Amino acid sequence: MGVGMEVKLAECIGFCFGVKRAVDTVYEQIKNGKNIYTYGAIVNNEEVVKDLAGKGVRVLESKEALEGLPESGCASVVIRAHGVPEEVYGILNEKKLECVDATCPFVKRIHRIAEKESRDGRHIVIVGNAGHPEVEGIIGWCGGLVTVLKNEEEAEKFTVPEEEKLCIVAQTTFNYKKFHNIVEILEKKGYNSIVADTICSATEERQRSARTLAAEADVMIVIGGKHSSNTRRLYEICCEECVHTYFIQTLDDLHLELPKAVRLVGITAGASTPNKLIEEVQNYVRINF
Ligand code: F3S
């Protein structure tokens, strides 16, 4: 490492509590010697999924794949942190498959709110991205009307009969400011609504600490999956603060050409990036520059 050069990790980095818990759960299950399936990739990171595949863990990509499994007493299906619609538990039950539920407790809370408020006759408004597995899971706990709104324009266009009551929740990783703008738009329309701010602070803290570090750093490295939207967001934030920002998925992607007078290299990583990879990158920079 160059004289006087420092490598520093962001304060909040990598796996959040819920994802760590889900990944740890799968590794624990492997020790039990059962056939293990995860309902969807356990984490949005190819490296981790590959490592688990090497240990015999198979990924069920759809409800149909789950329905196609033979009834068995020796297979476990792990539900990932994003959670699943209620009907998936029904299928597991019917097929007598062991369900290992690693739904993040913060997501579970949204399921409970959606279930209860639907039962009380409220129209559930999920502020989030339609098609995201977490949102699909929440929809599956709404017994009645449900709408997904992803931005202010959609909120402006959204209308329901005056007597309808709303319950507004958020996808856990949704942008805080945007959520509040959307809530404000809906409240101005005068609907009877209750609001549950269900945004998880892990994302915000990770973003805040990435920004702080990027503002100090001469070079910033963002590690995460290509398809991970939270990693992409981290990358954008770091680019705003630091012109020499690199987005890498694995160590092989890292072709650093450090500007001469680098004092500080900062590292941050998305919610799906394992510690092992973060350490590898950190060591690589320490040894090679
Ligand atoms: Fe859970 Fe928050 Fe992570 S909701 S899965 S701890 S981002």
Image (tube, helix red, strand yellow):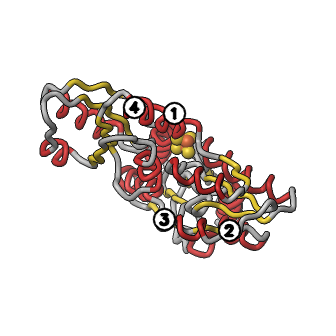
Spatial CA span between label 2 and label 3: 18 Å
Which marked residue is nearer to the observer: mark 2 or mark 3?
A: 3
Q: Is residue 166 above or below residue 20?
A: above
The residue depicted at 59 percent of the width and 50 percent of the height is: 89
Secondary structure found at label 4: helix
Who comes first in sequence, dot 2 or dot 1? 1
Q: Position of residue 250 (x, y in %)?
A: 60, 69
The quarter of the image holding the C terminus is bottom right
Left or right: 276 as drawn, with respect to 45: right
The verdict on label 3 being within 8 Å of ligand 1 is no
Residue under numbered circle 1: 109
Mark 2 Cα within 10 Å, few/some/many (few <14, many 20+)? Answer: few
Residue type, numbered disc 3:
Phe
Q: Position of residue 227 (x, y in %)?
A: 47, 66
Left or right: 29 as drawn, with respect to 189: right
Mark 3 Cα within 10 Å, few/some/many (few <14, many 20+)? Answer: many
Spatial CA span between label 2 and label 4: 60 Å
The residue depicted at 79 percent of the width and 69 percent of the height is: 55
Residue under numbered circle 2: 288
The verdict on label 2 being within 8 Å of ligand 1 is no
The residue depicted at 73 percent of the width and 53 percent of the height is: 98
Residue type, numbered disc 4:
Arg
Q: Is residue 116 above or below residue 92?
A: above
Who comes first in sequence, dot 3 or dot 1? 1
Contact flag, marks 3 and 4 (Cβ < 8 Å): no
Who comes first in sequence, dot 1 or dot 4? 1
Residue under numbered circle 4: 119
Q: Quadrant of residue 285?
A: bottom right
